[in-house]
Image (cartoon, helix red, strand yellow):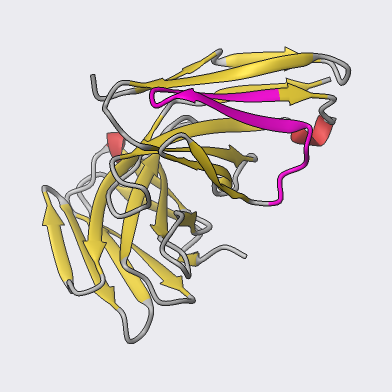
Amino acid sequence: SQQGEEDPQALSIQEGENATMNCSYKTSINNLQWYRQNSGRGLVHLILIRSNEREKHSGRLRVTLDTSKKSSSLLITASRAADTASYFCATDGEYGNKLVFGAGTILRVKS
Amino acid sequence: DTEVTQTPKHLVMGMTNKKSLKCEQHMGHRAMYWYKQKAKKPPELMFVYSYEKLSINESVPSRFSPECPNSSLLNLHLHALQPEDSALYLCASSQEGGPLSGYTFGSGTRLTVV
């Protein structure tokens, strides 16, 4: 079974608005990562947050991690049409030896 | 060079064919991975190579045969595939022997089995 589940499955917003995606996972982790995928091609690594971190920023991205609730969120501020993509969270699995992806959120940013 | 290069980008093959997918990276990464992704689904791990040795096989059918000839190359040999094996096949690499850092993904090979 997939390690992470994401919510919502799909999100449609206007350009300039913020987008928030949530991810839940089942087992203990060493880190959690977020990836973006455009049009069914390769995934791009966005950000990694370690289990002892609670919040991390990178440009317009803000990631939070709550290990007590086994959940994470990805916030994209001031969204752009180019942010339209699928976003996946991924964790390093029960034994920390492989990357397992959640179901993903499809984000559409309308201009 | 900060890329993972996959060839070919598209492949159509018959169920009796033998073909190979190729993946190459020159970032000095010592872990390489094959993932399979069906439409509108997340990538699913198939194989992990760590320091050129197969470390994880996620119970993948034997019609998929991975090979790691050296630290920069990863192949996936395909034989007697079924139409349900049609998918996007993604290769990735990472700096360490596990997902302790971000993965670099190739753009994938879109495989159609007819």
- State the residue in front, B51 or B65: B51
Residue A28 picture location, percent across and down? 40, 77
Tell me the quarter of the image containing the C terminus of chain B: top right
- State the residue in front, B18 or B86: B18
Tell me the quarter of the image containing the N terminus of chain B: top left
Residue B27 picture location, percent across and down? 26, 26
**Residue at image location 75% in from the left, 34% down from the top:** B85
**Residue at image location 48% in from the left, 32% down from the top:** B91
The residue sitting at the right extreme is: B16
Residue A91 picture location, percent across and down? 40, 61
Q: Within the magenta stretch, is there residue B47? A: no
Residue A76 picture location, percent across and down? 23, 54
Q: Within the magenta stretch, is there residue B60? A: yes
Q: Is residue B95 left or right of residue B73?
A: left
Residue A72: name its quadrant. Answer: bottom left
Q: Is residue B72 left or right of residue B35?
A: left
The residue sitting at the bottom extreme is: A68
Whether B31 is drawn above or below B68: the answer is below
Residue A31: name its quadrant. Answer: bottom left
Q: Is residue A1 left or right of residue A109?
A: right
Q: Is residue B105 left or right of residue B62?
A: left
Specify start and end residues of the magenta stretch as a single range: B59-77
Classified by dominant secondary structure, the portion drawn in magenta counts as strand
The number of discs equals 0
**Residue at image location 54% in from the left, 18% down from the top:** B22
- State the residue in front, B76 or B105: B76
Whether B45 is drawn above or below A18: the answer is above
